[in-house]
Amino acid sequence: MKTLPDFDMVLFGGTGDLAMRKLLPALYQQVKAGTLSAGSRILAAARKQLSREAFLELAEATCRPFLGESYDPDTWRSFADRIHYFPMDVQSGASYGALGERLGQHPDRVRVFYYSTSPDFFAAISAHLGATGLITADSRVVVEKPLGHDLESSREINDAVGRHFAERQIFRIDHYLGKEPVQNLLALRFGNVLFEPLWRREWVQDVQITVAEQLGVEGRGDFYERTGALRDMLQNHLLQLLCIVAMEPPTSSDPDAVRDEKLKVLRSLKPFTPQDVVTKTVRGQYKAGAVGSRPVAGYAQEPGVAADSRTETFVAVKAEIDTWRWAGVPFFLRTGKRMSDKLAEIVINFRQVPHPIFGGADHTSRANRLIIRMQPDESMRLYLMAKQPGDAMTLHPVNLNLDFEESFRERRLEAYERLLLDAIRGKLTLFVRRDEQEAAWHWVEPILDSWAASEDRPKLYTAGSWGPAGSSALLSRDGLAWNEED
C-alpha cells in the first residue's frame, strides 16, 4: 500500500477501552506496514492528567497484548514519535483553543476527529470544534455506535453533528463492514457470475446470520442495562450484514451507489405488528452456567445490573424482505452473550433438488449451503453433495473450503485498520449513511415498543448454551433449524 499523506487524528477518549484495544493497535500496524508517514500525528485527548511520557507508557503496556507477535520495540518507538497526549474536558470550550494551537495552521491537511466517547458528548464536541474553527474543508469525523437508543435520539445526535460537519464528512463506523469475509462476500456476489443467478427466492430456502459471544457484559453492566442486545448488535451489525446479503447489484462501487442499494433493503423489510413481535422475535437473558468449563454468573448477578432486570442479552428475529427477489425467504438474525461458542457467520441455505433420483430422502437431507464465517476463523465454505466411494450410488456432503489464511499468505487487515485507512482517505463506501441508520431504527422500534409494553420477561437461558428454546422454535415453525442443530 502507498504511504498516506500527512494527517492529524484526534482521538477523543484516547485513554478508553476502544482506543487502547482497537484504534492504537490498528494505527501501529500501519506504521509497521509503512503506510503512515513520519509527519502524521495522533493526538489522544482525555480527562486524565497525564504527561506525554506517562500516556505512552500506559499505551504500550495496554496495547501490547493486542499486538501479539507483531509487537516490535523499534516499530513501537517509531509509532510513539507520532503520538501526543492532550488532557482536556471535552465539554469545556476553553480546552479547544489549546487543541487548535497544538494542531496548528494546516488548512489543507486531513484532520480526522474520532469520537471514541459516549454519544452523550458528541453534540458538545462538535459544537466546540465548530466554534473554534477547527473543522476544515478536509476534516472528517468518525462516530461510534450506538447512536442513540431510538429513532428520535438518533436524529438528535445526527442533527447535532450535522450542524458542523457535512454528510460527506461524517463516517458512522460499523466495524463488521471492515471484516475481510464481508469484503469477500461483496467480491463473491458482484465480482463473479456464478452465484448471482442463484441469489434469489427460487433457489434460496433461508438465510441465517449469527453473531454469538462467549463473553458477558465484562464490567459494563450500567451501559448494557441502557442498551441490550437488540440496540447493541442487531440494529447495526446484523442489519448491515443482512443488507450486504440481500442488496441488488449496485451500478458501481461508488459509496452512494452501494449505500443506495442497502437503503432499499432496509426500507423493504416487512414492518412488525404487535402480533409479529410475539411470534417472530425471541429475547433471552443468560443465567448462571459454564462457558468453556469455567463457571460464570448470571446477568442479574453482574455488577451494575438490577436484580430484576428485563434487559435482553439474547435476541433472535425472523425478518422478511418484501421484494421480488426475496419474497417468502426468511432471514433469521441471532445474537447473544454467554453463548456456547464465539461465532460470527452467515449461512445461505439453498433449496433441495426438485426431483431426487439417488435413492431415499436421506441421501439429500443436507442441501447445498454457503457459509461465510467471520470469527473465530475467516473462511467461506460451499457444501455440495458428492458420491461416497463404493459400489452404491450413495451421496455424502463435502465442502469446498476457502481458508483465507491458506489462500493468501500476506497479513490481512483487521477491520479497524481498513476503516481507519478509508476514513483518512475519505472513502465512505464501508460507512453507514444517515438515512440507512434511520431506516434501521424505524424497523426495530416496533420491537422495542412491544417489549416495553409487555409484562413478559426475557426467557432465561443457561450461560454456555445456544440461547432459549424459543430460538429453535422460531425456525422449527418453518420446518428449519439453526446451522449447528442441522
Image (cartoon, grey):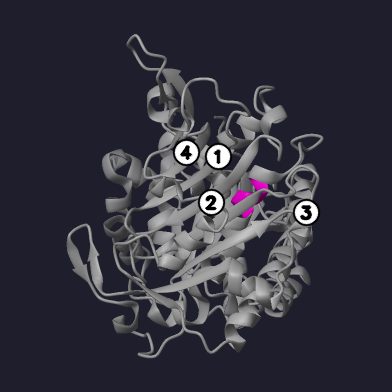
Q: Nearer the viewer, residue 41 or 274?
A: 274
Magenta segment, principal secondary structure? helix
Instruction: Give the mark nearest the N terminus, 2 or 4.
Output: 4
Disc 1 packing (10 Å; few <14; some 14–19; many ≥20)? many
Q: Are marks 2 and 4 in contact (CB under 8 Å)?
A: no
* The label number, if any, that marks residue 413 in the structure image: 4
* Count of residue discs: 4
Q: Is residue 156 left or right of residue 124?
A: right
Q: Are marks 2 and 1 in contact (CB under 8 Å)?
A: no
**Mark 1 — residue?**
349
* The label number, if any, that marks residue 82 in the structure image: none
Asked where in the image residue 333 lies, by quadrant, the reply is bottom right
Instruction: Give the mark nearest the N terminus, 3 or 1.
Output: 3
Q: Are marks 3 and 4 in contact (CB under 8 Å)?
A: no
Q: How far from the left and from the top, in percent, is residue 140?
A: 68, 57
Instruction: Give the mark nearest the N terminus, 3 or 4.
Output: 3
Query: In terms of secondary structure, where does tag 1 sit?
Result: strand
* The label number, if any, that marks residue 322 in the structure image: 3
